[in-house]
Image: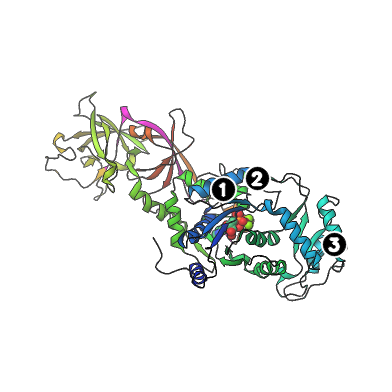
Amino acid sequence: LKPKSLNFLEEIVQADLAAGKYPQGIFTRFPPEPNGYLHIGHAKSICLNFGLAKEFGGKTNLRFDDTNPITEETEYVESIKKDVAWLGFSWANELYTSDYFETLYQYAVQLIEKSLAYVDDSTAEEIAAQKGTPTTPGVSSPFRNRSVEENVDLFQRMRAGEFPDGAKVLRAKIDMAHPNMHMRDPLMYRIRHVEHHRTGNAWCIYPMYDFAHGQSDSMEGITHSICTLEFDVHRPLYDWFIEKLEIFPTHQYEFARLNLSHTVMSKRKLLQLVNEKIVHGWDDPRMPTISGLRRRGFTPASIQNFCERIGVAKRDNLIDISLLEFCIREDLNKSANRYMAVLDPVKLVITNYPEGQTEDLWIENNPEDESTGKRSVPFSRELYIEREDFMVDPPKKFFRLGPGLSVRLKGAYIIQCESFEVNEDGSVKEIHATYIPESKSGQDTSGIHVKGTIHWVSIPHAEVAEVRLFDRLLIVEDASELGDDFMKFINPESFQVLEKVFVEPALREAQVEKAVQFMRKGYFCLDKDTKDGHLVFNRTVTLKDTWAK
Ligand code: ATP
Ligand code: MG
Ligand code: MG
């Protein structure tokens, strides 16, 4: 669904196009650093960048911003490509900042030659001290006035590997009293004798984000470089490099990053959850990662819809995770077929139904979509029903089963409870009922009306499944101010396993990640851990929002 009014980025693009600024069309990019799996915040950025290009007839690059060899891996590159494609987007070019290392190096030399960059031997601590504070000017490094020749020579030798890590850096020569701290001679290059996931050992100096990003945008002819709000203070530096290098003038625009309640979203923190085994990997269904959401049963449409609904803001805010759940419910209500599964079983015997007899009932797959047809569901004398659908001493408005009460079995017959047996611990062991043969669904001539309908599974036909239930990862709503303390707020009940759930036989055909509805219980999907006939289902979401704040 299109929003009624344009967001501020759409307005900018529309105005630029109307002014004839980009006759070739607009170009955006999605620039992940391959240091982790993508999360729902990235999905927001993906939908925005690819969405803008799609809307205005432009193109989008997928650029891996791989300038930090310490944290980057090819496994992450592969997962990112898979996730972007799964979300439904195709990129014009697959690019890597590391492919620009030579050009970036030449750019740096150009700046040195213009006396706009210098090699500094100061330590990280000394440089931090030189920078001063936002209210006091900084002081010049003692190496600030090295000659162009000396700088060119030292920078070449940095590249050649003559100096150890940290011995020297390359800094832009801007203004040590600039009101914007990022303009006080920021770092451009640092020495890192580390193997890079793509360039191997070809380089031992690596460009900083601020020097790499804008220049990469420019090389690709990006017209609208969209990033999150915290980069607005970097924009003067972004513009300074482009101006001094006299290269294609790309422009940076900032929007508010997505913050979601009850979870964390920085890759570093998500990696910590993985490494400390709080979750079972990046694609654990509790994770806010794209791969976790996919495994949990989320659809690309639901995530796109969510990103559309939250809109594009210029101020940070916190979105409640229940909105994401609302979006998946809305989608699955239309698209997921219904099945019967009994999560907490108790045995029900229909005493007047012939022993050994089986009957195939035809039940509609999805009342929201007639084209999905019907499936056959076996019915017999012995069934499982949910334990909570029977009460020994039911209150007045309990329209399910209890001594003397009647209820309809979904797609089958009306039954009346005659008696029940209890276990030694007092729990109900078995319920006995009689059925009314004339009350069969679709051809009911019994004239009897009951208020409730419950689901069931035929015992001799049932398949046993493991069902995994998930809840909020954190017990706090807003973890953004917690820093590393977020680990103290992990929800101990975020993961629960039901070992013996009974499902109707049609669910043997369930497909991994394809959502189904377990009637009255929620949306579920088959998990990849399913093997050798051992079915494992993940609960995507309950039918209604049950989270108590
Ligand atoms: P994180 O550490 O949370 O993964 P990041 O910004 O370091 O965030 P990148 O791989 O650099 O991760 O991000 C790629 C793109 O996705 C960037 O343009 C970034 O601004 C955007 N992005 C990252 N997190 C969010 C978020 N929560 N909401 C919106 N966009 C985001
Ligand atoms: Mg980043
Ligand atoms: Mg990061």
**Residue for badge 2:** 73
Extent of the magenta region: 454-480
**Residue for badge 1:** 80
Residue 125, quarter of picture: bottom right
Q: Nearer the viewer, residue 422 or 94?
A: 94
Of circles 3 and 1, the one toward us is 3
Q: Nearer the viewer, residue 199 or 223?
A: 223
Residue 121, quarter of picture: bottom right
In the image, is residue 411 above or below residue 543?
A: above
Secondary element at tag 1: helix
Asked whether, in this view, residue 106 is left or right of residue 301, the answer is: right
Q: Position of residue 285 (x, y in %)?
A: 50, 45
Residue type (three-letter) at the residue carrying disc 2: Glu
Total numbered circles: 3
Residue type (three-letter) at the residue carrying disc 3: Asn
For the residues labelled 3 and 2, say whether their Cβ atoms are less than 8 Å apart.
Answer: no
For the residues labelled 2 and 1, say whether their Cβ atoms are less than 8 Å apart.
Answer: no
Asked whether, in this view, residue 220 is left or right of residue 357, the answer is: right
Q: Is ligand 1 within 8 Å of the beta carbon of the residue shown at mark 2?
A: no
Q: Position of residue 320 (x, y in %)?
A: 47, 59
Secondary element at tag 2: loop
Which mark is on residue 151? 3
Residue 362 belongs to magenta span: no
